Amino acid sequence: GSGSSSSSSSSAAAAVPTAPASTSGHVNIQVGANQKFVFSPSNVTAPVGTLVTFFFPSAIAHSVTQSSFDAPCTHLASNGSSPAGFDSGLQQGTQFTINITDASVPIYFHCKAPTHCGLGMVGSINAPTTGDQTFQAFQAAAVKIGSSEKTESDTGFASGGVGAVATASAADTATASASASSSSGSTKKSGAVGLVASGLTAAAGAVLGAVL
């Protein structure tokens, strides 16, 4: 009983991609951390030029969709000279990176998967720490919408945005990352195949020798 449940929970945890620790010039955020409807960390400060990368879990689809303080659960629409906000689209098991272009503008975002924003799955970058537009106030506004949250259509990738722009779509980021790891592992893989092949040849020779 208890051994098997502990082992299955360990495997489930291992299957979720984990955001590495943030470094200078690069902030990493875990989407759906610990299988909850949260971004972790949910509120960060990032100067201009900082790359903020979101790591998506494999099990449940989430998005990183820019919104506004006044409409926490709605994709930020274009307005005059301001472009529409960034949007990763619904993703699983990938990464999505935005580049901060204006640190004086608070950046608010949410997950557009049905009901997630109303459960408080929102985040902010460079939000004020005092006053009425803090991260805490933004999250409270999302939770207040709750089950009245309107379902958003998944229109896919949008580079955006206000205060930040996406560097590439989540699929592109994941592909680049996969090809880099694939090329680094190719030498080891071909070496292993060679060892297996030579082992089989030796075994076949031994069998033939015994038969003869």
Image (cartoon, rainbow, N blue to C red):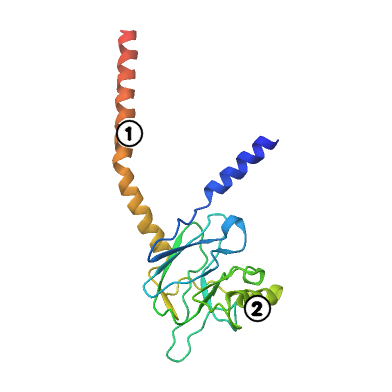
Could you tell me which quadrant the N terminus lies in? top right
User: Is 32 on the left or on the right of 174, as rendered?
Assistant: right
Task: Decide which of tag 1 and tag 2 comes sooner along the chain.
Answer: 2
Please give the residue where the numbered disc 2 appears in the rendered image: 141
Give the percent coordinates (x, y) of residue 170.
43, 64
Q: Classify 93 as above or below 201.
A: below
- Residue 193's tag is 1
Helix, strand or loop under label 1:
helix
Amino acid residing under circle 1: Val
Helix, strand or loop under label 2:
helix
Give the percent coordinates (x, y) of residue 211.
34, 9
Residue count near mark 2 (Cα–Cα under 10 Å), binned few <14, some 14–19, many ≥20: some
Could you tell me which quadrant the C terminus lies in? top left
Circles 1 and 2: CB atoms closer than 8 Å: no
Direction bottom: furthest residue: 80
Residue count near mark 1 (Cα–Cα under 10 Å), binned few <14, some 14–19, many ≥20: few
Give the percent coordinates (x, y) of residue 153.
56, 74
Measured in 3D between alpha carbons, the distance from the residue under mark 1 to the one under mark 2, in whole angstroms, is 57 Å
